[in-house]
Image (tube, rainbow, N blue to C red):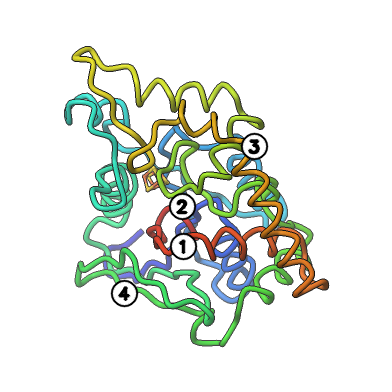
Amino acid sequence: MPKSKVRHILGLSGGKDSAALAVYLHDRIPEMEYFFCDTHKELPETYEFLERLKARLGIQIKYLEADRGFDYWLEMLGGYLPTPKARWCTKNLKIIPMEQFICDDKAISYVGIRADENRDGYISRRPNIKAVFPFKKDGLVKSDIIQILEDSGIGMPSYYNWRSRSGCYFCFFQRKYEWLMLSEKHPDYFAKAIEYEENHKDGRTFTWNEGERLLDLVKRKDDIIRRHEEYMEREKQNAPEKPLAEVLADVLDSQDTAEPCFICQL
Ligand code: SF4
């Protein structure tokens, strides 16, 4: 592609908002380049959802990889797991590969933040990259996004009935209920997440959740699930017409004010 041409890029996270944006813009911007920053720590449901998107829209998705993966950086950092305040994973596995992909080209980056969100996150400060927010501009909210995906025949990612955000299976932005569901849906990944916490030569333990090991979290499973079900019941009574995935997302969002970065979770 000639350097003078402005590139149009859309980063897919494996979540509903960026996927809906791809559907929304597909006919309007035929030259759009779609990409996904693959950490190799993703859920299989994420890859399956991206395949569905590709097939339905007839698009190519470029899978971007960091030169060095998560385990390399973890070792370099002495086993120090990433946290909301130290998101070295986002920087090394998502942002740098994206900037390498764009290089010095002029690019418009389409971001799926909705009109009903007051979210901030990574927007490249590079002068050659301009971020735009079509859903914000056109006033589209969560129910519109779900409708776009339903109407397109793509639907929601299948993990949405137990987890409301895309991202790595061990993402520290997961809520306690989501960790417990990971232990049920993907016990092998849950076991690996425990290994990341426990398996350090010097005997130290790092935790994904502040102050609580996963081994201790599972001991409180019944209590966490019971409370989650109570919240769900209340939310369903308040809004009986809401789809279940939306009820779940609202319940989980209400328990957590942490804002994940949208390069991972949109
Ligand atoms: S999804 Fe979570 S763990 Fe994975 S790169 Fe993003 S912030 Fe880090």
Among numbered discs 3 and 4, the one appearing first in the sequence: 4
Q: Which mark is residue 84?
A: none
> Disc 3 versus disc 4: distance between alpha carbons?
47 Å
Q: Residue at x 53, y 50 (%)?
A: 166
Nearer to me, 173 or 36: 173
Going from N to C along the chain, the mark reached first, 2 or 1, is 1
* Type of amino acid under label 4: Lys
Mark 2: few/some/many CA within 10 Å (<14, 14-19, 20+): some
Q: Secondary structure at mark 2?
A: strand
Quote the CA–CA distance across marks 2 and 1.
6 Å
SS at mark 3 in the image = helix
3D distance between C-alphas at marks 1 and 4:
12 Å
**x and y percentages locating residue 1 in the rendered image:** 36, 58
Ligand 1 neighbours mark 2 (CB distance < 8 Å): no
- Seen in the picture, residue 1 relative to 215 is either above or below; the reply is below
Q: Residue at x 62, y 62 (%)?
A: 251
Which residue in the structure is indicated by mark 4?
130
Which amino acid, by three-letter code, is at mark 2? Answer: Phe
For disc 3, the marked residue is 222
Horizontal relation, residue 178 to residue 122: left or right: right
